[in-house]
Amino acid sequence: MLYPFAVYFGTQYLEPWKIASVLFVLLAIRFAASYSVKHWSSPLLLVGMVYCGFAIWSNELLTLRFYPAIANAAMLLLFSWSLWSPPSVIERLARLQHPDLPPEGVVYTRRVTQVWCGFFIVNGSIALATALFSSVEIWSLYNGLIAYLLMGILFIGEYLIRIKTQNHAR
C-alpha cells in the first residue's frame, strides 16, 4: 500500500534502482517466510522479485510505476486460474470459517471470485494507464489511495450483500 508513496517520495532523494532494491529485499524476506510453509503467494512473490531485478537493471522511474499493474495482473491470474481449477480463491477463504460450505455457497463464492477478477481487470488497466500517461503525483494518488479505497468499497459491499443473502436464506 505504501509502495506508490515510497516511489513518489523516494525518487526525490534516491535513484530508482535503490528503491527497487529495497522492494526486492522486502519481497525476498516475505518469500523466504512463505516458502517454508508452502504459502500460495510464493509464485507471486517470485514474479515480484524478478520484476524488481528488471527495475534495478533498468534504473528507470517508469519501470517502478508498472508494479501496481503487474500486481493486479498477478492477482487476476491467481483468481481466474482458481475458476478453471476449483475451488476458487474466495471458496477457499470461505471454507476456513465454514468447512461444510453448501452448494449455494460454492456458487456464491465463485461469483464473488468472478467479480474480483473484473475488479483486477479494471484496476490494473487504470494502474497501467496512470503509469504510462499521468504524472507521478496522479499515479501515487490512484495507486496508493484510490485503488485501496475502491478495494475496500468492494470488500464491504460484498460483505453487506453476503449478510443480506444469508439472512434471506434463513
Image (cartoon, grey):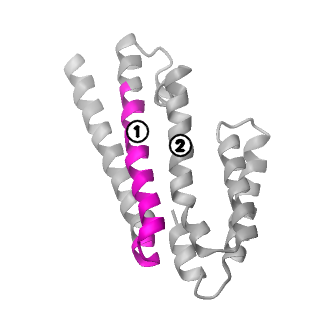
| Picture residue at 40% right of the left edge, 38% below the top | 116
| Picture residue at 22% right of the left edge, 30% below the top | 164
The part of the image, by quadrant, that contains residue 150 is bottom left
- Residue 115 visible: yes
Q: Is residue 129 magenta?
A: yes
Closer to us: 40 or 64: 64
Label the magenta part by its dominant secondary structure: helix
SS for tag 2?
Answer: helix
The part of the image, by quadrant, that contains residue 19 is bottom right
Label 2: how many residues lie within 10 Å, few (<14), some (14-19) or many (20+)? some
Q: Amino acid at mark 2?
A: Met
Q: Earlier in the sequence, mark 1 or mark 2?
A: 2
SS for tag 1?
Answer: helix
Do the residues under discs 1 and 2 have CB atoms within 8 angstroms?
Answer: yes
Of the numbered discs in the image, which one, if any, rests on residue 75? Answer: 2
Q: Which residue position is annotated with label 1? A: 116
Compared with residue 124, is residue 15 higher up or lower down, i.e. above or below? below
Residue 106 in the image: x percent, y percent? 41, 18
Q: Amino acid at mark 1?
A: Trp
Residue 97 in the image: x percent, y percent? 48, 27
Q: Is residue 48 magenta?
A: no
Q: Which residue range is magenta in the image?
A: 111-140
